[in-house]
Image (tube, coloured by chain):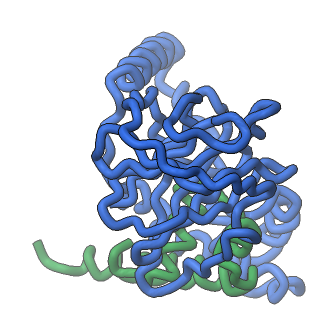
Chain colours: A blue, B green
Amino acid sequence: MSAAPDHDRWAESLGAWLLGALPEDEVEGFRTHLESCADCRADAESLRVAVDALPASAPPMAPPPALKGRLMAVVEREASLLEAAGPDADRAKRSRRRRRFPHLAGLTLRPALVLPLVLLLLVIGGGAALLGRTAFDGQDARTVVARVNPELKGSQAALEVEGDRARIVGKKLPPPPAGHVYQVWLDRGGQSPEPTAALFSTRGDGTVSVDVPGSLDGVRAVMVTDEPIGGSPKPTGRTILTATPA
Amino acid sequence: MESLPPEQSHVIELAYFGGFTHTEIADILETPVGTVKGRMRLGLEKLRNSLRMLEMQPG
């Protein structure tokens, strides 16, 4: 085996490439390097087994009945097509990235009990700057992939959790409609989710990074809804995402 | 994944299940991109080694 001349530049990107985490503008460069670098090809082959095992490590989540029904319909339809197309029809090209995004079929929000004071804190471009960023990189940090409203095609979000603190991160999220903001809610199992002061919009590139105010103690779910500017004492708009930190 | 140090499983989860790129993860974690890439690779190596050990165990 031998390394290509540009090995040092690209070698550290191998893990990211295998995980589908290279930015688009680096993918072609890495592929070109891989073609000429026997060392990296061998490493990629060796590490592939770890990537292939990742789906089995995802937390099991039961899909909502409506989604399950749609999935089964797709599976049965594709099975029929494959059967008709012959034995080689399912030898598809390998997907660059495989994701597991259980979708939210719709959340029923219950009426509010109390009307707490909602601070008029509009956080444009992510709440980090105003709410104070927290480095979610400690020993007990973990990630909970959020269920994003399936109407928001291509949008992705996750909850970064460390101790009793959390931050919502997302990408490819549409900005809230004119006159609206996104608002974070905490579902503690009461009659209605608690409003928080975290009101935000997306950055220009569709990304989001907003700290969840307060403690996660007793929180069953963190939710984001679309609300009029200034926020609401109880959810009125559509649910954008839900994440269950437990 | 439970066998990995949290900082390694964290970046792998964000990348693989969250769909974030290494630069996005670096921004989320306020960590240098090089560190994120290093953790991804180290995490995958440890995961591979754990899988090999499991395969070697009898039964």
Outermost residue to the left: B59
Q: In the figure, B42 relative to A59: above or below?
A: below
Quarter that holds the N terminus of chain A: bottom right
Residue at 54 percent of width and 54 percent of height: A196
Residue at 73 percent of width and 59 percent of height: A126
Locate residue A216: give its quadrant.
bottom left
Please say whether residue A39 is visible from this viewpoint.
no
Q: In the figure, B44 relative to A193: above or below?
A: below
Locate residue A164: give its quadrant.
bottom left
Q: In the figure, B59 relative to A196: above or below?
A: below
Please say whether residue A132 is visible from this viewpoint.
yes
Residue at 60 percent of width and 63 percent of height: B15
Left or right placement of residue A27 versus residue A173 in this view: right
Q: In the figure, A236 relative to B43: above or below?
A: above
Left or right placement of residue B57 versus residue B13 in this view: left
Q: Nearer the viewer, residue A1 or A239?
A: A239
Residue A207 is situated, as x and y percent measured from the top left of the image, at 75, 54
Residue B55 is situated, as x and y percent measured from the top left of the image, at 27, 74
Locate residue A130: give its quadrant.
bottom right
Q: Nearer the viewer, residue A100 or A132?
A: A132
Residue B21 is situated, as x and y percent measured from the top left of the image, at 71, 63
Residue at 41 percent of width and 81 percent of height: A140
